[in-house]
C-alpha cells in the first residue's frame, strides 16, 4: 500500500475549521467509506500506522453521567497524524455530545484541519460493522437485525447491504422517533427497492437473524443474550450496554477491533474470560476466516479506532474544502 500524494490544501500553516453545518450535506457513498476504513485497518496491520489504546475517564459526579476520552494515531497511508477528543454528558442526548478531530500532515509538519467529528463517527462506525460482518458471518447470510437508532446506528443497514449482497431481510428496532425516521431515510437513499421492517419483538427476531448488531447505547430493549442466536449467528456489539453481561461465555468465537480496547472497555462482557480468537485488522489483511464451521456462534466487539477516523475525516474535509466550506485561521501567527 503506497502513500497518497499530499494535496495542496495541506501545504501551508493555515488551520481550516469545518463545523457540523459545513459537513452536513457532504455525502460519501457506503462503498467508499468501507474502502477507506478497510485501508485504515490494513495500514495498521502492515505496520505503516500507529494506534495506541484510547484514554478514557468517567467523570466523578455520577448524577451527570459524563464521560470523556481521546485518541491519538498516525495514518501511514495518508501521512496524517490525528487527535480526536470526545465529551458526553448524560445518556444519548446528541445535544450534549461533542467530538472533534484535528489532522496534521506529517510529510510537511503542518496543520491541516480541525473539524466536528460527529459525521466521521456516524460513517466509520457502520463501515467497521460491515467489515466485521463480512469477515465473521456465516457464508451467504440472509437476515440482519439492527438494534438502535442513534447517530452511530442509522447508517448501518445500507452499509451491511453493500458489504454482503446475500442479505435479503433487514429488520430494526429503536425508540427515538427521529432516529426511526432517519433509519428508513438512509436505507431508502441507497437501496430504494429493498424492504425494511420495524419490530418490537426483539428476542424473536434475534432468534431468526444471521447477524444481530447491537448499537443501542443505553438500550431500551431487554439485554441481548448470545445464546438467543441461531446456529451460525453473529452478534456485533457496537460499544452498547444492550448486550447481556458475560456474553462471550455463550459463543464459540470472539473477535474484537482492538485487543487493547476490548480489555479496557469490554470487562463486563468478558466476566473474567480471556478468549479472543482474532482482531479485525489481522482478519482483513490475511483474509482468514474466524470460523472452523458454519454453525459456530460468534461475538464481535467493535470499539472506535482513530486509524479509521483519520481517512474518513480526510475524505470529508477534502470534499468540503473543495466545495468552499469552512474558514481558515492563522492560529500560530
Image (cartoon, rainbow, N blue to C red):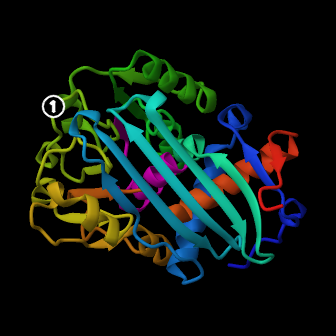
Q: Is residue 101 above or below residue 6?
A: above
Nearest the viewer among 169 and 253 is 253
Q: Residue furthest bottom?
A: 47
Q: Is residue 164 left or right of residue 113?
A: left
Question: Percent position (x, y) of residue 86?
Answer: 47, 48
Nearest the viewer among 85 and 64 is 64
At 62% from the left edge and 60% from the top edge, which residue is drawn?
310
Q: Is residue 148 left or right of residue 206?
A: right
Q: What is the quadrant of residue 232 in the picture?
A: bottom left
Question: Percent position (x, y) of residue 52?
Answer: 44, 73
Quadrant of the snapshot with the N terminus: bottom right
Nearest the viewer among 49 and 112 is 112
At 67% from the left edge and 43% from the top edge, which residue is drawn?
29
Label 1 neighbour load within 10 Å: few <14, some 14-19, many 20+: few
Mark 1 lies on a secondary structure that is: loop
Q: Is residue 133 above or below residue 326?
A: below
At 62% from the left edge and 28% from the top edge, which residue is drawn?
189
Q: Is residue 69 visible?
A: yes
Q: What is the quadrant of residue 331 in the picture?
A: bottom right
Residue 133 magenta-highlighted = yes
At 74% from the left edge and 46% from the top edge, which residue is drawn?
17
Q: Is residue 37 visible?
A: no
Residue 73 magenta-highlighted = no
What residue did someone put label 1 on?
222
Q: Is residue 84 above or below residue 148?
A: below
Quadrant of the snapshot with the C terminus: bottom right
Q: Is residue 15 above or below residue 81?
A: above
Magenta-drawn segment: 124-147
Amino acid at each position: 500500500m503506497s502513500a497518497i500524494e499530499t494535496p495542496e490544501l495541506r501545504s501551508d500553516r493555515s488551520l481550516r475549521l469545518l463545523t457540523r453545518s459545513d459537513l452536513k450535506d457532504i455525502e460519501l457513498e457506503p462503498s467508499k467509506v468501507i474502502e477507506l476504513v478497510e485501508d485504515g485497518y490494513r495500514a495498521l496491520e502492515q505496520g505503516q500506522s500507529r494506534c495506541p489504546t484510547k484514554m478514557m475517564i468517567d467523570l466523578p459526579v455520577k448524577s451527570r453521567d459524563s464521560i470523556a476520552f481521546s485518541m491519538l494515531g498516525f495514518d501511514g497511508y495518508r501521512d496524517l497524524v490525528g487527535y480526536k477528543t470526545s465529551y458526553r454528558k448524560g445518556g444519548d442526548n446528541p445535544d450534549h455530545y461533542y467530538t472533534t478531530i484535528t489532522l496534521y500532515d506529517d510529510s510537511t509538519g503542518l496543520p491541516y484541519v480541525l473539524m466536528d467529528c460527529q459525521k466521521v463517527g456516524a460513517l466509520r462506525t457502520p463501515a467497521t460493522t460491515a467489515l466485521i460482518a463480512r469477515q465473521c458471518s456465516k457464508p451467504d447470510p440472509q437476515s440482519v437485525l439492527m438494534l438502535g437508532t442513534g447517530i452511530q446506528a442509522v447508517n448501518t443497514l445500507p452499509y451491511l447491504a453493500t458489504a454482503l449482497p446475500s442479505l435479503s431481510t433487514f429488520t430494526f428496532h429503536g425508540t427515538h422517533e427521529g432516529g426511526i425516521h432517519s433509519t428508513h431515510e438512509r436505507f431508502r437513499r441507497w437501496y430504494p427497492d429493498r424492504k425494511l421492517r420495524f419490530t418490537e419483538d426483539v428476542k424473536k427476531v434475534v432468534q431468526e437473524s444471521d447477524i444481530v448488531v447491537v448499537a443501542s447505547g443505553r438500550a431500551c430493549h431487554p439485554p441481548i443474550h448470545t445464546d438467543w442466536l441461531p446456529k451460525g449467528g453473529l452478534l456485533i456489539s457496537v460499544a452498547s450496554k444492550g448486550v447481556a453481561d458475560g456474553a462471550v461465555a455463550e459463543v464459540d468465537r470472539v473477535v474484537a477491533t482492538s485487543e487493547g480496547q476490548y480489555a479496557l472497555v469490554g470487562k463486563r462482557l468478558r466476566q473474567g474470560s480471556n478468549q479472543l480468537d482474532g482482531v479485525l485488522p489481522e482478519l482483513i489483511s490475511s483474509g482468514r476466516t474466524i470460523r472452523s464451521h458454519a454453525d459456530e456462534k460468534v461475538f464481535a466487539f467493535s470499539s472506535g479506532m482513530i486509524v479509521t477516523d483519520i481517512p474518513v475525516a480526510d475524505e470529508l474535509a477534502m470534499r468540503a474544502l473543495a466545495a468552499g466550506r469552512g474558514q481558515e485561521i492563522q492560529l500560530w501567527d
